[in-house]
Image: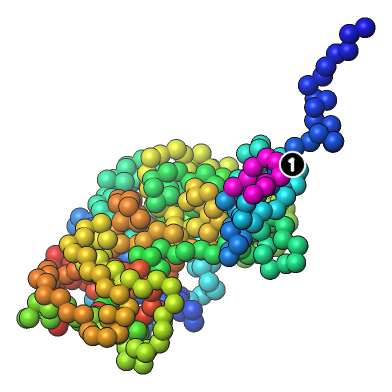
Amino acid sequence: MNFGYLLFVKTSQNTDYLKLGYALALSIKHTQKPGYDKVALVIDDPSLLKKLNSAWVFDHVIEWGQEDGWDGRSWMDHLTPFDYTVCLDADMLFLRDYSHWIDYFIENTDLYVCNKSYTYRDEIVTNRFYRKTFVESNLPDLYSFYTFFKKNDMSLEFFSMGRYIIKNQDVFANLYLKHRPSIVGTDEAFALAAKILDIQDQISYELDFPKIVHLKPMVQNWPWQSDRVTDHVGFYFNEEAQLKIGNYKQDSIIHYVEKELMTDEYINILEELVWNKN
Amino acid sequence: MEQELIFEDLYTDNNKIEFYAFYNQTDGSVFEIFPGFPTNTDKKFVKVDAEILDSIESGHSNIFSYYVDIKTQDPQLQKKTNSNFVLTKIDDVLHRVIEKKWSKIKNSDVQIKYSKKNEVLEFKINPSIKNIQWPGEQEMIFLITGYNDPNSVKQLIRFTVDELASFPQIHKIKLRSKFSIFTRRLFTNYTLEIK
């Protein structure tokens, strides 16, 4: 089985995305069993890998900087070195073995895009604060932060449409989006592509997984407004790479959003665990 | 013909009961709302207007949603807005002291050192702020816990700012190789050094 996770990072003045991707790759190596722990990195400047203590956690490094920002993710089908791929956002963290999800996807589907997220208290996110475009434009509620696909005609057609939408976003936004975002991002492009191709029920049907805790502040079901989750609850990552947020132990994949949460101290914990495992 | 007494007649404008609110003279916080003009009291009070009363009675707001603007000549009840709200961040009440090797803080206000060899935990204040008079809270509380786990408290250490300014605080304590120290943040910067 040629399965792996695909991460995109791009040089940025404000955020060290390679550091975030490195932490995610370490957490994958630490928690996933052999055969389910391969990671490929797409990066515009591979020379930056020299600064990492264990760059070997990236099984494949693909130099590519063709698109600005996160638009590159719509090229995931072209860039992946795997037959079966899950494309992830860089600011995520694995906390336990999720390989049974992969077994299901390989067995049952060609393409699956996550369609819900969870609060740190394991509640399904229902707040639409960040999803006004989806609600008002009646788009399927897709989250590109966890996208499974096989290399085949269906995924080629879907991602080609996604790329076409991103390239021609003014036209598509005028035609289809009632609440127009400042940028048509990958989530909106994938949702529009699914709607136009009429495949939303095939690629994003109801499942209890993948479970992703989305730490955006306004969707935590708090009775107050918030700018940052960590203003209100602590982020406690222990020496066994187990995580508590407030008093809630986390088991799902964490999409931590606040980039500064991934400190060198936590990366060192992950590095030691991975070194001891090998 | 017998005159019908209608209950609502009692509440004509002439008979309407006025409500008043007692408030704290120093910060303007409201602590009681009551009917009838208060007599024989030293407490400060203001009249509560009908709109606010309706809002409180109907449950749309409560008395803590209001304050008295004590800076004005004619103090009135005001609704608190976001500009009045000061967020107490979790990091201010349960701040983890970051180990020096992972911290970007160069010149901390409070330095904590742990000697594994001597099993001694030492707290020192930065000499440059030693003689400053600190208003407000004086008690410094440190939770010695499992690594990055404030729920697993091994020991609690307390002293005052004055005590720390007078002498370094030294505690004999045996700790695991990995531990954390949490504190409420009276000062801005704290560092921990383990040797």
At x 35%, y 55%, the residue is: A246
Q: Is residue A216 magenta?
A: no
* Relative vertical location of residue A161 with respect to residue B38 in this rendering, above or below: below
Q: Which residues are magenta?
A: B32-40
The residue closer to the viewer here, B43 or A92, is B43
Q: Quadrant of residue A169?
A: bottom right
Residue A250 in view (yes/no): no
Rate crowding at label 1 as few (under 14), some (14 to 19) or many (20 or more) other CA atoms within 10 Å.
Answer: some
Residue B149 in view (yes/no): yes
At x 49%, y 82%, the residue is: A13
Residue located beneath label 1 in the image? B18
Q: Is residue B30 left or right of residue A34?
A: right
* Relative vertical location of residue B167 with respect to residue A36 in this rendering, above or below: below
Q: Chain of mark 1?
A: B
At x 67%, y 47%, the residue is: B39
Q: Is residue A109 left or right of residue B26?
A: left
The x, y position of residue A268, in whole percent, is 24, 74
Amino acid of disc 1 = Glu
The C terminus of chain A is located in which quarter?
bottom left
Question: Seen from this angle, which residue lies furthest left?
Answer: B117
Question: Seen from this angle, which residue lies furthest right?
Answer: B1
